[in-house]
Image (tube, rainbow, N blue to C red):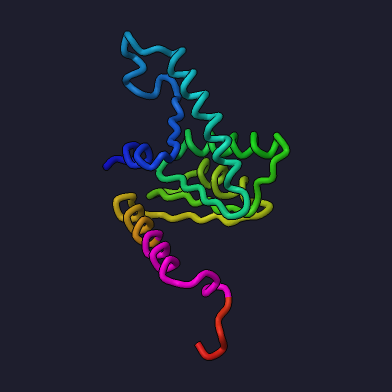
């Protein structure tokens, strides 16, 4: 199942951020710049609202986008904060086979400079993404098997 189909079936929002002229479909005679701009702007506003939900423990993953998504993310963080909303104590991660300037600055450093955690994972996506998915799945399964709070307090005999 594709990421888009999986998200749709689970009612998870997905956003697409168009950079006009970067995809071959933009040259098609029936492509509408007006429509592309309209839906991309809608998605940016949706992305901003989702970025606002990162406060207090959310996680943002940038997987392989060296330019567009790091810029969109930083602008969304700025929108949330400039509207007077608290956006602190969240985690950002950049997964790529080379760590580039924009993701390092706009995903890892600037958004989390006052509070939060930034993680750079360097490696090939075909290895790193399945490993991350497996780690998340194992963590969720382990937390489902434990009583709530068991990770917070350990007795001295364990």
For residue 156, above or below residue 94: below
The verdict on residue 138 being magenta is: yes
The residue lying toward the viewer, choosing from 152 and 63, is 152
Q: Nearer the viewer, residue 126 or 88?
A: 88
Residue lying furthest right: 84
Please give the name of the residue rendered at 46% of the width and 22% of the height, measured from the top-left corner.
Answer: 39
| Residue 73 drawn in magenta | no
- The residue located at (54%, 39%) in the rendering is 50
Task: Please tell me which residue lies in front, 149 or 68.
Answer: 149
From the viewer's perspective, tell me whether residue 115 is left or right of residue 70.
Answer: right
Q: Farthest residue to the left: give it.
A: 1
In the rendered image, the quadrant that contains the N terminus is top left
Image location (x, y in percent) of residue 29: 32, 8
Outermost residue to the top = 29
The x, y position of residue 62, in whole percent, is 46, 45
Residue 123 in the image, given as x and y percentages of width and height? 36, 54
Q: Residue at left 41%, top 70%?
A: 145
- Indicate left or right for 96 with 57 as reference: left
Indicate the position of residue 46 as horizontal and vertical percent values. Answer: 53, 32
Vertical order, 70 against 136 (above or below): above
Magenta extent: 136-152
Residue sticking out furthest to the bottom: 157
Q: Is residue 21 left or right of residue 130?
A: right
């Amino acid at each position: 199942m594709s990421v888009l189909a999986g998200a749709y079936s689970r009612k998870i929002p997905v956003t697409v951020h168009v950079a006009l002229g970067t995809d071959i479909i933009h040259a098609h005679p029936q492509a509408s710049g007006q429509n592309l701009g309209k839906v991309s702007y809608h998605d940016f506003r949706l992305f901003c609202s989702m970025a606002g939900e990162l406060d207090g423990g959310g996680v943002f993953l940038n997987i392989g986008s060296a330019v567009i998504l790091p810029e969109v993310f930083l602008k969304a963080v700025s929108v949330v904060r400039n509207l007077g909303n608290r956006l602190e104590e969240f985690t950002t991660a950049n997964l790529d086979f080379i760590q580039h300037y924009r993701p390092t600055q706009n995903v890892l450093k600037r958004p989390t400079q006052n509070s939060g955690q930034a993680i750079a994972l360097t490696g090939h996506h075909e290895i790193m993404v399945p490993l991350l998915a497996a780690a998340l799945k194992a963590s969720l399964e382990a937390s489902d098997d434990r009583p709530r709070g068991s990770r917070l307090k350990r007795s001295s005999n364990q």
